[in-house]
Image (spheres, grey):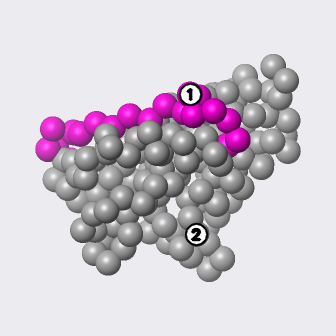
């Protein structure tokens, strides 16, 4: 088995959709980024890539490449999943935390777990998603953006 950790953060931007964990959330602002800026899925991708020492999503999907402009985090996750599978591995489980002052994440967490599980091809019981605030400290606490961190356990297929 292999373990990886991932982290991502994006600032809010007017006029963008807010997509976290593959789920669109009604909010006045979205997150700024070259892709859909899905901080949760970006952190999950980095955790999976890190588990196999494959770098990070910026290396595989650079923001300098126009092919990735506006790409959905679910598509990035699908590609990363294919990368680990071609190397003989599957996801054992994912544990992730969203750090945000706004909007409230609790109503969406179950949908996020299901969306991630669908892309990974596993049961939602293997996907942990939590949310926390920073008690109004830092950029997340001031409502300037959202961050996420994730840990991925990757196991050799058949084990």
The local crowd at label 2, few if under 14, some if 14 to 19, many if 20 or more residues have their Cα within 10 Å, is: some
Q: Residue at x 51, y 54 (%)?
A: 22
> Magenta stretch containing residue 46, yes or no?
no
- Dot label at residue 125: 1
Query: Is 139 colored magenta in this rendering?
Result: yes
Q: CA distance from mark 2 to mark 1?
A: 27 Å
Query: In which quadrant will I find the N terminus?
Result: top right
Picture coordinates of residue 25, whole percent (x, y): 36, 58
Q: Give me the residue at 56% from left, 76% from top.
A: 69
Can you identify the residue that label 2 sits on? 71
Residue 68 at x, y percent in the picture? 61, 72
Which residue is located at x 81 percent, y 19 percent?
Answer: 159
Q: Image point 25% across, 47% down: which residue?
A: 104
In the image, the segment drawn in magenta is 120-140
Residue 16 visible in the displayed image: yes
Q: What percent of the width, then of the height, locates residue 81?
A: 72, 46
Which circle, 2 or 1, is nearer the viewer? 1
């Amino acid at each position: 088995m292999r373990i990886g950790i991932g982290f991502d953060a994006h600032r809010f931007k007017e006029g963008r959709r807010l997509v976290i964990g593959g789920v669109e959330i009604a909010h006045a602002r979205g997150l700024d980024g070259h892709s859909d800026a899905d901080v949760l899925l970006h952190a999950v991708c980095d955790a999976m890539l890190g588990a196999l020492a494959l770098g990070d999503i910026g290396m595989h999907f650079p923001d300098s490449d126009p092919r990735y402009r506006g790409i959905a985090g679910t598509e990035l996750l699908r590609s990363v999943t294919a990368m680990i599978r071609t190397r003989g591995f599957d996801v054992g489980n994912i544990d992730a935390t969203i750090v945000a002052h706004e909007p409230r994440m609790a109503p969406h967490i179950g949908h996020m777990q299901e969306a991630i599980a669908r892309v990974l091809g596993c049961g939602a019981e293997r996907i942990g998603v939590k949310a926390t605030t920073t008690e109004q400290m830092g950029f997340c606490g001031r409502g300037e953006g959202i961050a996420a961190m994730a840990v991925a356990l990757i196991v050799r297929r058949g084990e």
